[in-house]
Image (tube, rainbow, N blue to C red):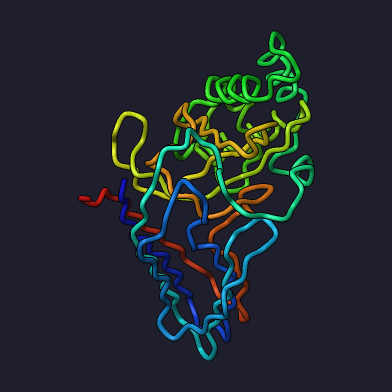
């Protein structure tokens, strides 16, 4: 499947600031499930460093703007050819041990309720059946947190989302990571794009899911928000221990000003 992406991120400042420095994780991952046909990341007046690959196999570039900066527009456009690998991250090169992803953050720390959810989901599944346990926990998270935009925010934790019973893809990913780690399965957060939801409705925003490390298979993606594993509709950008570390754009600004952020993402199928 060929998928076209147009992703525009706009920052507006109430008064000019002196400098902006950002780290971009906006380059599609290299693995057997997707191939980049063309891809551009553009910022008017921006200075880009040479890209480098971090230990998790993600491509990172630094962008800076100097002088009096009133606005930053980041334009991402490109076309990706994808293949359905049933969620398996095949032929993805990385150097970090999966055991690193047994640690948690404030966002993914399992509380008693998350531990109980995970334990109940895998109670009848052998400890060696990692794939079955992963599927069971993903289903339990989907049941425990109903997809409901606007009920949570960027800093909502997995525990808070489960207690509320409502959330979005970020909350589902954090909750699944917390559940997996609580039963000893390494798990991480993945950011990317989704062409359409499971019912075929076009998806208008960036998307997130979780990857769990499964013996004999390696990293396998699970998307509780859509009750599936990533397939040809998904474009993978990068990963981290939570949404903050996996964010496509991270940065700092020098100067004092209120900041307005607007993000527009369009993901469409391209005729072969």
The image position of residue 211, as x and y in percent, is 61, 39
Rendered residue at 38%/69% (across/down)? 75
The image position of residue 13, as x and y in percent, is 48, 75
Instruction: Give the residue furthest to the bottom.
Output: 67
The image position of residue 23, as x and y in percent, is 59, 69
Rendered residue at 44%/72% (across/down)? 12
Instruction: Give the residue furthest to the top.
Output: 124
Quarter holding the N terminus? top left
Of residues 116 and 193, the one nearer the viewer is: 193
Rendered residue at 53%/59% (across/down)? 248
Instruction: Give the residue furthest to the left.
Output: 271
Of residues 67 and 140, the one nearer the viewer is: 140
Count of marks placed on residues: 0
The image position of residue 190, as x and y in percent, is 57, 46
Q: Decide: is 261 above or below 181.
A: below
Q: Decide: is 124 above or below 177.
A: above
Tell me: 214 left or right of 105: left
Tell me: 114 left or right of 34: right
Of residues 154 and 3, the one nearer the viewer is: 3
Res 98 → quadrant: top right
Res 94 → quadrant: bottom right
């Amino acid at each position: 499947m060929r998928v076209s992406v147009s992703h525009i991120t706009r920052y507006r400042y109430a008064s000019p600031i002196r400098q902006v420095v950002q780290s971009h994780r906006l380059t599609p991952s290299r693995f057997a499930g997707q191939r980049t046909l063309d891809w551009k990341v553009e910022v008017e007046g921006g200075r880009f460093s040479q890209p480098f690959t971090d230990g998790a196999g993600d491509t990172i570039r630094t962008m800076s703007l100097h002088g009096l900066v009133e606005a930053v527009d980041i334009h991402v456009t490109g076309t990706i050819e994808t293949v359905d690998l049933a969620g398996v991250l095949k032929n993805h090169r990385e150097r970090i041990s999966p055991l690193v992803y047994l640690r948690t953050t404030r966002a993914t720390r399992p509380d008693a309720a998350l531990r109980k959810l995970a334990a109940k989901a895998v109670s009848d599944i052998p400890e060696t059946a990692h794939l079955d346990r992963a599927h069971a926990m993903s289903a339990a998270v989907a049941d425990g947190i109903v997809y409901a935009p606007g009920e949570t925010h960027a800093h909502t934790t997995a525990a808070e989302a489960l207690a509320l019973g409502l959330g979005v893809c970020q909350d589902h990913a954090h909750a699944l990571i917390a559940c997996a780690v609580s039963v000893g399965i390494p798990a991480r957060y993945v950011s990317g794009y989704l062409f359409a939801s499971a019912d075929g409705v076009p998806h208008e925003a960036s998307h997130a899911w979780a990857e769990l490390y499964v013996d004999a298979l390696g990293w396998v993606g699970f998307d509780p928000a859509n009750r599936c594993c990533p397939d040809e509709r998904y474009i993978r950008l990068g990963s981290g221990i939570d949404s903050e570390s996996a964010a496509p754009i991270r940065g700092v600004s020098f100067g004092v000003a209120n900041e307005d952020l607007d993000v527009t993402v369009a993901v469409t199928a391209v005729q072969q």
